[in-house]
Image: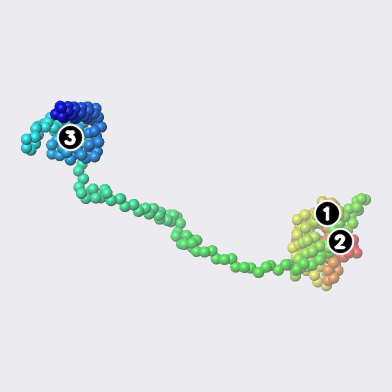
């Protein structure tokens, strides 16, 4: 009885191992791809099957070749590497082999190019210009010298005489005080201010002048109380007739006799003494004083 039990247990053990082996084989065939990839990743396949098989991966169809192995191991058919088939189209360009120096140069980073200085355009002088003025222009401009403040011109009061026409048409003489520059020719300055006519403030008061426009004093001298005044030719033409001639003579005589050294005035036209002024016949042949008006 014990022998039958041993045999039965031995047969059961064999069946178990046969079933286990079959199960392993089935799992191996089912998971062959997974198992092979795991073996390749872990490197166990290289260790177990070293020097037994050689495989070459290629996109081209492999041509089997026979390779002998050492000892009594069977022959294995392994695809041999095939040269790339020449394309019927354009031939592929041959790959350029780089020398070690060129490889080292490629590995080293290219030095940064220094910024090339931009060429500065040379300043050329114009053909028709000289370089000296340009050089002079580069020099700093000389500072303007400070001029002392101009002193105000001293003034004096001059007594001038104008006329006013009243409502009845009568010509009346009016005295005006005006500031004029103080010079060595006070009589000439007073007459020049008189020839300029009344200013705006004086015109508002009705002041007028009967001296013909364009009248100029050519010369003036005072001797023994007589002021000899030489006028240009414009002095003898007055558009207001006899009243205008009398009015202009009165303005000259009264303005000149404001000076204490002048008592009367002798009138000259262009350096010539004339007896009458204008076609109306106003006497100017002798010196005129205030009591003549």
Q: Which residue is mark 2?
A: 175
| Image quadrant in which you'd find residue 275 | bottom right
Q: Where on the picture, by quarter, is residue 36?
A: top left
Q: Which residue is drawn at the image coordinates 30% and 50% (left, top)?
A: 109
Q: In front of the other: label 2 or label 1? A: 1
Quarter of the image for the N terminus: give it: top left
User: What is the quadrant of residue 199 in the picture?
Assistant: bottom right
Q: Earlier in the sequence, mark 1 or mark 3?
A: 3
CA separation in Å, label 2 and label 1: 13 Å
Residue 140 in view (yes/no): yes
145 is higher (above) or lower (below) than 51 = below
Residues packed near mark 1 inside 10 Å, few (<14), some (14 to 19) or many (20 plus): few
Q: Which numbered disc flags the more N-terminal residue, 2 or 3? A: 3
Q: Residue, x 19% and y 27% (percent of image)?
A: 12
| Mark 3 element type | loop
Q: Which residue is mark 1?
A: 203
Whichever of labels 2 and 1 marks the residue nearer the N terminus, that label is: 2
* Residue at the spot of label 3: 56
State the image coordinates of residue 7 (x, y, percent, origin top left). 15, 28
């Amino acid at each position: 009885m014990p022998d039958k039990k041993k045999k039965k247990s031995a047969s059961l053990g064999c069946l178990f191992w046969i079933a286990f082996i079959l199960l392993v084989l089935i799992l191996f065939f089912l998971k062959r791809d997974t198992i092979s990839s795991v073996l390749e990743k872990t490197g166990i396949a290289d260790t177990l099957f070293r020097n037994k098989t050689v495989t070459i991966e290629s996109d081209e169809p492999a041509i089997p070749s026979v390779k002998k192995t050492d000892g009594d191991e069977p022959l294995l058919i392994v695809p041999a590497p095939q040269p790339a088939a020449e394309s019927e189209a354009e031939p592929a360009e041959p790959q350029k082999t780089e020398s070690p120096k060129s490889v080292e140069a490629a590995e080293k980073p290219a030095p940064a190019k220094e910024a090339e200085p931009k060429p500065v355009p040379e300043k050329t002088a114009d053909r028709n210009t000289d370089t000296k003025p340009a050089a002079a222009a580069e020099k700093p401009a000389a500072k303007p010298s400070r001029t002392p403040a101009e002193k105000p011109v001293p003034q004096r009061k001059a007594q001038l005489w104008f006329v006013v026409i009243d409502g009845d048409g009568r010509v009346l003489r009016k005295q005006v005080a005006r500031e004029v520059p103080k010079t060595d020719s006070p009589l000439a300055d007073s007459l020049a201010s008189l020839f300029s006519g009344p200013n705006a403030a004086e015109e508002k008061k009705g002041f007028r002048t009967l001296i013909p426009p364009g009248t100029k004093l050519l010369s003036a001298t005072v001797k023994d109380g007589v002021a000899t005044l030489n006028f240009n030719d414009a002095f003898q033409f007055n558009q207001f007739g006899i009243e205008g001639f009398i009015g202009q003579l009165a303005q000259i005589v009264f303005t000149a006799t404001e000076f204490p050294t002048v008592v009367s005035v002798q009138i000259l036209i262009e350096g010539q003494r004339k007896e009458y002024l204008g076609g109306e016949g106003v006497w100017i042949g002798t010196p005129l004083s205030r009591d003549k008006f």
